[in-house]
Protein backbone atom coordinates (compact mmCIF):
# COMPACT_ATOMS: atom_id res chain seq x y z
CA UNK A 1 0.00 0.00 0.00
CA UNK A 2 1.31 3.42 -0.87
CA UNK A 3 1.97 5.76 2.00
CA UNK A 4 0.75 8.82 0.10
CA UNK A 5 -2.32 10.51 1.43
CA UNK A 6 -4.93 12.93 0.26
CA UNK A 7 -4.49 16.42 1.78
CA UNK A 8 -7.30 17.92 3.74
CA UNK A 9 -9.25 20.66 1.97
CA UNK A 10 -9.33 23.29 4.68
CA UNK A 11 -7.25 26.43 4.06
CA UNK A 12 -3.85 26.40 5.72
CA UNK A 13 -3.42 28.88 8.60
CA UNK A 14 -0.45 31.20 8.87
CA UNK A 15 2.50 29.43 10.46
CA UNK A 16 6.21 29.97 10.91
CA UNK A 17 9.12 27.59 10.71
CA UNK A 18 9.35 27.61 14.50
CA UNK A 19 5.73 26.44 14.72
CA UNK A 20 6.55 23.26 12.79
CA UNK A 21 9.48 21.87 14.76
CA UNK A 22 9.07 18.51 16.44
CA UNK A 23 10.01 20.11 19.78
CA UNK A 24 7.06 22.51 19.53
CA UNK A 25 4.71 19.59 18.89
CA UNK A 26 6.12 17.86 21.96
CA UNK A 27 5.54 20.95 24.12
CA UNK A 28 1.94 21.11 22.94
CA UNK A 29 1.56 17.41 23.70
CA UNK A 30 2.97 17.85 27.19
CA UNK A 31 0.48 20.66 27.88
CA UNK A 32 -2.39 18.38 26.80
CA UNK A 33 -0.96 15.57 28.94
CA UNK A 34 -0.93 17.77 32.04
CA UNK A 35 -4.61 18.61 31.50
CA UNK A 36 -5.45 14.94 30.88
CA UNK A 37 -3.80 13.89 34.16
CA UNK A 38 -6.22 16.17 35.98
CA UNK A 39 -9.06 13.93 34.75
CA UNK A 40 -7.35 10.51 34.77
CA UNK A 41 -5.17 9.21 37.61
CA UNK A 42 -1.86 7.74 36.47
CA UNK A 43 -0.43 4.45 37.77
CA UNK A 44 0.56 4.91 41.48
CA UNK A 45 4.06 3.57 40.76
CA UNK A 46 4.75 6.66 38.65
CA UNK A 47 4.49 8.84 41.78
CA UNK A 48 7.35 6.98 43.52
CA UNK A 49 10.08 9.57 44.31
CA UNK A 50 12.75 6.97 43.49
CA UNK A 51 11.57 6.71 39.87
CA UNK A 52 13.94 8.53 37.55
CA UNK A 53 11.93 8.31 34.30
CA UNK A 54 8.75 10.39 34.49
CA UNK A 55 5.61 9.71 32.48
CA UNK A 56 5.81 12.94 30.47
CA UNK A 57 9.49 12.39 29.61
CA UNK A 58 8.82 8.83 28.47
CA UNK A 59 5.83 9.71 26.29
CA UNK A 60 7.59 12.72 24.74
CA UNK A 61 10.67 10.62 23.95
CA UNK A 62 8.41 7.94 22.41
CA UNK A 63 6.53 10.54 20.36
CA UNK A 64 9.82 12.06 19.20
CA UNK A 65 10.69 8.64 17.81
CA UNK A 66 7.60 8.80 15.57
CA UNK A 67 8.40 12.32 14.33
CA UNK A 68 12.14 11.83 13.92
CA UNK A 69 13.40 10.23 10.65
CA UNK A 70 16.59 8.91 12.26
CA UNK A 71 15.77 7.39 15.66
CA UNK A 72 13.39 4.56 14.73
CA UNK A 73 14.33 2.02 17.43
CA UNK A 74 14.26 1.87 21.21
CA UNK A 75 18.07 1.79 21.32
CA UNK A 76 18.21 4.81 19.03
CA UNK A 77 15.90 6.78 21.33
CA UNK A 78 17.86 5.67 24.37
CA UNK A 79 21.04 7.01 22.76
CA UNK A 80 19.31 10.28 21.77
CA UNK A 81 18.17 10.78 25.36
CA UNK A 82 21.81 11.50 26.24
CA UNK A 83 21.99 14.51 23.90
CA UNK A 84 21.99 17.89 25.64
CA UNK A 85 19.27 19.39 23.39
CA UNK A 86 17.02 16.35 23.79
CA UNK A 87 17.40 16.64 27.57
CA UNK A 88 16.43 20.32 27.41
CA UNK A 89 13.44 19.87 25.09
CA UNK A 90 12.19 16.28 25.55
CA UNK A 91 13.37 14.44 28.67
CA UNK A 92 15.38 15.69 31.61
CA UNK A 93 17.93 12.87 31.85
CA UNK A 94 19.43 9.94 30.00
CA UNK A 95 17.03 6.99 29.79
CA UNK A 96 18.11 3.38 30.27
CA UNK A 97 16.81 0.60 28.04
CA UNK A 98 15.28 -1.16 31.05
CA UNK A 99 13.38 1.95 32.16
CA UNK A 100 12.07 2.65 28.66
CA UNK A 101 10.90 -0.95 28.23
CA UNK A 102 9.29 -1.12 31.69
CA UNK A 103 7.26 2.07 31.24
CA UNK A 104 5.04 0.59 28.51
CA UNK A 105 3.46 -1.63 31.18
CA UNK A 106 2.73 1.28 33.54
CA UNK A 107 1.05 3.72 31.16
CA UNK A 108 -2.71 3.83 31.63
CA UNK A 109 -4.14 4.05 28.10
CA UNK A 110 -7.01 6.15 29.46
CA UNK A 111 -4.51 8.99 29.84
CA UNK A 112 -3.68 8.88 26.12
CA UNK A 113 -7.35 8.48 25.24
CA UNK A 114 -8.03 11.70 27.16
CA UNK A 115 -5.17 13.53 25.38
CA UNK A 116 -6.43 12.20 22.04
CA UNK A 117 -10.01 13.33 22.75
CA UNK A 118 -8.89 16.82 23.82
CA UNK A 119 -6.77 17.36 20.70
CA UNK A 120 -9.44 15.91 18.38
CA UNK A 121 -11.94 18.40 19.80
CA UNK A 122 -9.62 21.28 18.84
CA UNK A 123 -9.56 20.41 15.12
CA UNK A 124 -11.84 22.92 13.35
CA UNK A 125 -14.72 21.82 11.15
CA UNK A 126 -14.38 22.22 7.39
CA UNK A 127 -16.88 22.86 4.60
CA UNK A 128 -15.75 19.90 2.53
CA UNK A 129 -19.11 18.14 2.78
CA UNK A 130 -22.11 19.54 0.90
CA UNK A 131 -24.43 21.60 3.11
CA UNK A 132 -27.09 18.87 3.09
CA UNK A 133 -24.60 16.45 4.70
CA UNK A 134 -23.60 18.75 7.55
CA UNK A 135 -26.86 18.25 9.44
CA UNK A 136 -25.39 15.11 11.06
CA UNK A 137 -21.99 14.53 12.66
CA UNK A 138 -21.07 11.86 10.10
CA UNK A 139 -18.20 9.54 10.97
CA UNK A 140 -16.57 6.95 8.72
CA UNK A 141 -15.84 3.84 10.76
CA UNK A 142 -13.23 1.31 9.69
CA UNK A 143 -10.27 -0.73 10.84
CA UNK A 144 -6.80 -1.32 9.44
CA UNK A 145 -4.14 -3.94 10.13
CA UNK A 146 -0.58 -3.13 11.15
CA UNK A 147 1.84 -6.00 10.66
CA UNK A 148 3.33 -7.21 13.94
CA UNK A 149 6.63 -8.95 14.54
CA UNK A 150 6.70 -12.79 14.65
CA UNK A 151 7.65 -12.70 18.34
CA UNK A 152 4.51 -10.66 19.12
CA UNK A 153 2.60 -13.94 19.42
CA UNK A 154 -0.27 -12.31 21.30
CA UNK A 155 -1.20 -10.58 18.00
CA UNK A 156 -1.70 -13.81 16.03
CA UNK A 157 -3.98 -13.13 13.07
CA UNK A 158 -5.51 -15.79 10.84
CA UNK A 159 -5.22 -13.92 7.54
CA UNK A 160 -2.57 -14.10 4.87
CA UNK A 161 -1.06 -16.99 2.96
CA UNK A 162 -1.65 -20.52 4.14
CA UNK A 163 1.25 -21.98 6.11
CA UNK A 164 2.61 -18.60 7.21
CA UNK A 165 2.38 -17.17 10.70
CA UNK A 166 0.65 -13.80 10.47
CA UNK A 167 0.70 -11.42 13.41
CA UNK A 168 -1.12 -8.11 13.22
CA UNK A 169 -2.52 -5.32 15.37
CA UNK A 170 -5.81 -3.72 14.31
CA UNK A 171 -6.56 -0.04 14.70
CA UNK A 172 -10.28 0.85 14.72
CA UNK A 173 -11.09 4.49 14.00
CA UNK A 174 -14.24 6.61 13.86
CA UNK A 175 -13.19 9.37 11.45
CA UNK A 176 -15.10 12.65 11.63
CA UNK A 177 -15.85 13.69 8.04
CA UNK A 178 -16.50 17.34 8.92
CA UNK A 179 -13.15 17.93 10.61
CA UNK A 180 -11.31 15.22 8.65
CA UNK A 181 -9.77 14.00 11.89
CA UNK A 182 -10.19 10.88 14.07
CA UNK A 183 -12.91 11.20 16.71
CA UNK A 184 -12.56 7.83 18.48
CA UNK A 185 -10.13 4.92 18.30
CA UNK A 186 -9.46 1.47 19.71
CA UNK A 187 -6.51 -0.90 19.37
CA UNK A 188 -7.06 -4.68 19.36
CA UNK A 189 -5.44 -7.85 18.09
CA UNK A 190 -5.76 -8.36 14.35
CA UNK A 191 -8.48 -10.99 14.50
CA UNK A 192 -10.83 -8.88 16.62
CA UNK A 193 -14.31 -8.25 15.19
CA UNK A 194 -14.81 -4.72 13.87
CA UNK A 195 -18.54 -4.79 14.63
CA UNK A 196 -17.82 -5.73 18.25
CA UNK A 197 -15.37 -2.84 18.50
CA UNK A 198 -17.95 -0.39 17.18
CA UNK A 199 -20.62 -1.76 19.54
CA UNK A 200 -18.40 -0.84 22.48
CA UNK A 201 -17.96 2.76 21.28
CA UNK A 202 -21.43 3.67 19.98
CA UNK A 203 -22.91 6.80 21.49
CA UNK A 204 -26.57 7.66 21.22
CA UNK A 205 -27.22 9.87 18.23
CA UNK A 206 -24.01 9.07 16.32
CA UNK A 207 -24.05 8.94 12.52
CA UNK A 208 -21.91 6.38 10.68
CA UNK A 209 -20.79 5.68 7.12
CA UNK A 210 -19.57 2.08 7.07
CA UNK A 211 -18.40 -0.47 4.53
CA UNK A 212 -19.51 -3.96 3.53
CA UNK A 213 -18.03 -5.85 6.48
CA UNK A 214 -20.53 -4.23 8.86
CA UNK A 215 -23.45 -5.43 6.70
CA UNK A 216 -22.75 -9.14 7.19
CA UNK A 217 -25.21 -9.28 10.12
CA UNK A 218 -28.43 -7.40 9.43
CA UNK A 219 -29.38 -7.37 13.12
CA UNK A 220 -26.56 -4.87 13.61
CA UNK A 221 -28.62 -2.26 11.72
CA UNK A 222 -31.36 -2.58 14.32
CA UNK A 223 -28.84 -2.11 17.13
CA UNK A 224 -27.73 1.18 15.58
CA UNK A 225 -31.30 2.40 15.14
CA UNK A 226 -32.15 1.43 18.73
CA UNK A 227 -29.37 3.76 19.92
CA UNK A 228 -30.76 6.61 17.84
CA UNK A 229 -27.90 6.39 15.33
CA UNK A 230 -28.09 7.25 11.64
CA UNK A 231 -26.18 5.07 9.21
CA UNK A 232 -25.23 4.63 5.58
CA UNK A 233 -23.75 1.20 4.85
CA UNK A 234 -22.64 -0.53 1.70
CA UNK A 235 -24.15 -3.98 1.25
CA UNK A 236 -22.43 -7.09 -0.07
CA UNK A 237 -24.09 -7.00 -3.48
CA UNK A 238 -23.65 -10.73 -4.22
CA UNK A 239 -25.51 -11.69 -1.01
CA UNK A 240 -28.03 -8.89 -0.54
CA UNK A 241 -31.62 -10.16 -0.91
CA UNK A 242 -34.12 -7.31 -0.69
CA UNK A 243 -37.80 -7.85 0.11
CA UNK A 244 -39.19 -4.65 -1.37
CA UNK A 245 -41.96 -2.93 0.56
CA UNK A 246 -42.21 0.19 -1.58
CA UNK A 247 -40.46 1.48 -4.69
CA UNK A 248 -39.33 5.10 -4.36
CA UNK A 249 -38.96 7.69 -7.12
CA UNK A 250 -35.52 8.50 -8.56
CA UNK A 251 -35.15 12.20 -9.32
CA UNK A 252 -32.96 13.83 -11.97
CA UNK A 253 -30.44 14.94 -9.33
CA UNK A 254 -30.23 11.33 -8.10
CA UNK A 255 -29.61 10.03 -11.63
CA UNK A 256 -26.84 12.61 -12.09
CA UNK A 257 -25.12 11.05 -9.05
CA UNK A 258 -25.33 7.57 -10.59
CA UNK A 259 -28.46 6.37 -8.75
CA UNK A 260 -30.87 4.36 -10.88
CA UNK A 261 -33.17 2.82 -8.25
CA UNK A 262 -34.22 3.18 -4.61
CA UNK A 263 -36.78 1.34 -2.51
CA UNK A 264 -37.88 0.70 1.06
CA UNK A 265 -37.63 -2.89 2.17
CA UNK A 266 -36.07 -5.53 4.38
CA UNK A 267 -32.86 -7.46 3.91
CA UNK A 268 -32.23 -11.15 4.51
CA UNK A 269 -34.20 -14.36 4.65
CA UNK A 270 -37.43 -15.04 6.53
CA UNK A 271 -35.60 -15.83 9.80
CA UNK A 272 -33.04 -13.03 9.61
CA UNK A 273 -35.00 -10.11 8.20
CA UNK A 274 -33.57 -6.68 8.96
CA UNK A 275 -35.54 -3.65 10.01
CA UNK A 276 -37.27 -1.71 7.26
CA UNK A 277 -34.71 0.56 5.62
CA UNK A 278 -34.04 2.35 2.37
CA UNK A 279 -31.91 0.61 -0.26
CA UNK A 280 -30.23 2.59 -3.03
CA UNK A 281 -28.74 1.15 -6.22
CA UNK A 282 -26.11 3.15 -8.09
CA UNK A 283 -23.41 2.70 -10.69
CA UNK A 284 -19.85 3.07 -9.43
CA UNK A 285 -16.97 4.81 -11.20
CA UNK A 286 -15.83 1.48 -12.65
CA UNK A 287 -19.29 0.55 -13.89
CA UNK A 288 -20.00 -1.85 -11.00
CA UNK A 289 -23.36 -1.90 -9.20
CA UNK A 290 -23.20 -0.57 -5.63
CA UNK A 291 -25.96 -1.08 -3.08
CA UNK A 292 -26.28 1.26 -0.10
CA UNK A 293 -28.67 0.97 2.84
CA UNK A 294 -29.73 3.73 5.25
CA UNK A 295 -32.31 4.27 7.96
CA UNK A 296 -32.81 7.89 6.88
CA UNK A 297 -35.81 8.84 4.77
CA UNK A 298 -35.28 10.50 1.40
CA UNK A 299 -36.59 13.81 2.75
CA UNK A 300 -33.72 13.93 5.26
CA UNK A 301 -31.03 12.45 3.00
CA UNK A 302 -31.61 12.23 -0.73
CA UNK A 303 -30.32 9.30 -2.77
CA UNK A 304 -27.80 11.62 -4.45
CA UNK A 305 -26.48 12.85 -1.10
CA UNK A 306 -26.28 9.27 0.16
CA UNK A 307 -24.06 8.39 -2.80
CA UNK A 308 -21.88 11.46 -2.21
CA UNK A 309 -21.59 10.66 1.48
CA UNK A 310 -20.37 7.14 0.76
CA UNK A 311 -17.66 8.55 -1.51
CA UNK A 312 -16.43 10.68 1.40
CA UNK A 313 -16.01 7.48 3.43
CA UNK A 314 -12.70 7.01 1.63
CA UNK A 315 -11.21 9.79 3.76
CA UNK A 316 -10.72 7.23 6.52
CA UNK A 317 -8.69 5.04 4.13
CA UNK A 318 -6.45 8.00 3.29
CA UNK A 319 -6.04 8.63 7.00
CA UNK A 320 -4.88 5.06 7.66
CA UNK A 321 -2.31 5.40 4.91
CA UNK A 322 -1.04 8.60 6.51
CA UNK A 323 -0.80 7.01 9.98
CA UNK A 324 1.28 4.22 8.47
CA UNK A 325 3.65 6.91 7.16
CA UNK A 326 3.97 8.30 10.68
CA UNK A 327 4.42 4.80 12.07
CA UNK A 328 7.26 4.03 9.65
CA UNK A 329 4.92 1.36 8.19
CA UNK A 330 4.74 -0.62 11.41
CA UNK A 331 8.18 -0.34 13.05
CA UNK A 332 7.42 -1.16 16.68
CA UNK A 333 9.15 0.63 19.56
CA UNK A 334 7.16 -1.44 22.09
CA UNK A 335 5.96 -5.00 21.55
CA UNK A 336 3.56 -5.84 24.39
CA UNK A 337 -0.22 -5.46 23.82
CA UNK A 338 -0.23 -2.25 25.87
CA UNK A 339 2.97 -1.04 24.23
CA UNK A 340 1.56 -1.52 20.72
CA UNK A 341 -1.64 0.30 21.71
CA UNK A 342 0.48 3.06 23.24
CA UNK A 343 2.42 3.50 19.99
CA UNK A 344 -0.71 3.63 17.83
CA UNK A 345 -2.37 6.16 20.15
CA UNK A 346 0.76 8.31 20.00
CA UNK A 347 0.72 8.05 16.19
CA UNK A 348 -2.88 9.31 16.19
CA UNK A 349 -1.92 12.12 18.56
CA UNK A 350 1.05 13.00 16.35
CA UNK A 351 -1.22 13.17 13.30
CA UNK A 352 -3.57 15.52 15.18
CA UNK A 353 -0.69 17.77 16.26
CA UNK A 354 0.48 18.14 12.67
CA UNK A 355 -3.05 18.77 11.42
CA UNK A 356 -3.64 21.45 14.05
CA UNK A 357 -0.48 23.31 13.01
CA UNK A 358 -0.80 22.92 9.23
CA UNK A 359 -4.58 23.23 9.03
CA UNK A 360 -4.72 19.98 7.06
CA UNK A 361 -3.43 16.45 7.09
CA UNK A 362 0.07 16.53 5.55
CA UNK A 363 0.63 14.89 2.18
CA UNK A 364 3.63 12.65 1.55
CA UNK A 365 5.59 15.57 0.05
CA UNK A 366 4.81 17.83 3.03
CA UNK A 367 5.84 15.10 5.46
CA UNK A 368 9.13 14.68 3.57
CA UNK A 369 9.84 18.42 3.83
CA UNK A 370 9.25 18.31 7.59
CA UNK A 371 11.61 15.37 7.95
CA UNK A 372 14.32 16.95 5.77
CA UNK A 373 14.09 19.94 8.11
CA UNK A 374 14.56 17.71 11.15
CA UNK A 375 17.63 16.17 9.50
CA UNK A 376 19.15 19.64 9.11
CA UNK A 377 19.10 19.46 5.31
CA UNK A 378 17.12 22.71 4.95
CA UNK A 379 18.67 26.08 5.67
CA UNK A 380 17.18 28.37 8.34
CA UNK A 381 14.07 30.03 6.94
CA UNK A 382 13.86 27.62 3.99
CA UNK A 383 11.12 25.33 5.32
CA UNK A 384 8.30 27.87 5.59
CA UNK A 385 8.28 29.09 1.94
CA UNK A 386 8.72 25.54 0.64
CA UNK A 387 5.75 24.36 2.69
CA UNK A 388 3.59 27.29 1.64
CA UNK A 389 4.44 26.62 -2.00
CA UNK A 390 3.70 22.89 -1.70
CA UNK A 391 0.40 23.46 0.11
CA UNK A 392 -0.66 26.08 -2.46
CA UNK A 393 0.17 23.69 -5.32
CA UNK A 394 -1.87 20.91 -3.71
CA UNK A 395 -4.83 23.24 -3.18
CA UNK A 396 -4.66 24.46 -6.81
CA UNK A 397 -4.56 20.85 -8.03
CA UNK A 398 -7.54 19.97 -5.84
CA UNK A 399 -9.59 22.87 -7.20
CA UNK A 400 -8.66 21.92 -10.76
CA UNK A 401 -9.78 18.32 -10.19
CA UNK A 402 -13.03 19.53 -8.57
CA UNK A 403 -13.73 21.78 -11.56
CA UNK A 404 -13.32 18.83 -13.92
CA UNK A 405 -15.91 16.83 -12.02
CA UNK A 406 -18.58 19.53 -12.25
CA UNK A 407 -21.24 18.77 -14.90
Image: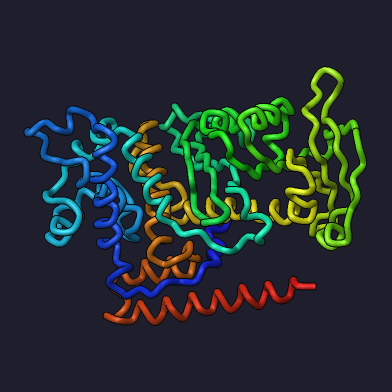
- Measured from the top left, where is residue 210 in percent x and y? 66, 42
Quick check: 391 left or right of 333? right
Write the residue at 24% across / 35% down: 103
Q: Position of residue 54 (x, y in %)?
A: 17, 41
Q: Which of the image's four quarters has the N terminus?
A: bottom right
Give the camera-side residue of 151 and 77: 77
Quarter of the rendering containing residue 395 = bottom right
- Residue sitting at the far front: 299
* Closer-to-camera residue (22/282): 282
Taking the image as shown, residue 406 lies to the left or right of residue 324, namely: right
Judge whether residue 339 can be spotted in this image. yes
Is residue 192 in sight in this rendering? no
Which residue is the extreme one toward the left?
50
Find residue 246 and report its image quarter: top right
Seen in the picture, residue 85 relative to 213 is either above or below; the reply is below
Residue at 87% x, 59% y is: 255
Assign the C terminus to one quadrant of the image.
bottom right
Q: Position of residue 36 (x, y in %)?
A: 29, 42
Q: Is residue 323 left or right of residue 404?
A: left
Residue at 77% over, 39% down: 235
Vertical comparison of 357 with 205: above or below = below
Q: Is residue 66 above or below residue 365?
A: above
Q: Quadrant of residue 117?
A: top left
Amino acid sequence: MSCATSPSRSPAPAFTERDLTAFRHLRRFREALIRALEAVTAHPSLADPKRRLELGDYLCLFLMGLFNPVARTMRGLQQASGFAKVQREVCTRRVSLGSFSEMQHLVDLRVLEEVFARLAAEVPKTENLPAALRTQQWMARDGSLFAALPRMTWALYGGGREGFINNAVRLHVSFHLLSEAPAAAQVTVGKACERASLRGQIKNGDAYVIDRYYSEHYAFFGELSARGCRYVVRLIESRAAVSVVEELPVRAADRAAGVFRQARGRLGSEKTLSEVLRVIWLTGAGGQIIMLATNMESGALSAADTARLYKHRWQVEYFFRWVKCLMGCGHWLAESPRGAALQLYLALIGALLLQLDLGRRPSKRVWELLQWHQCGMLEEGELEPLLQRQLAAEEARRQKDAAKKKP
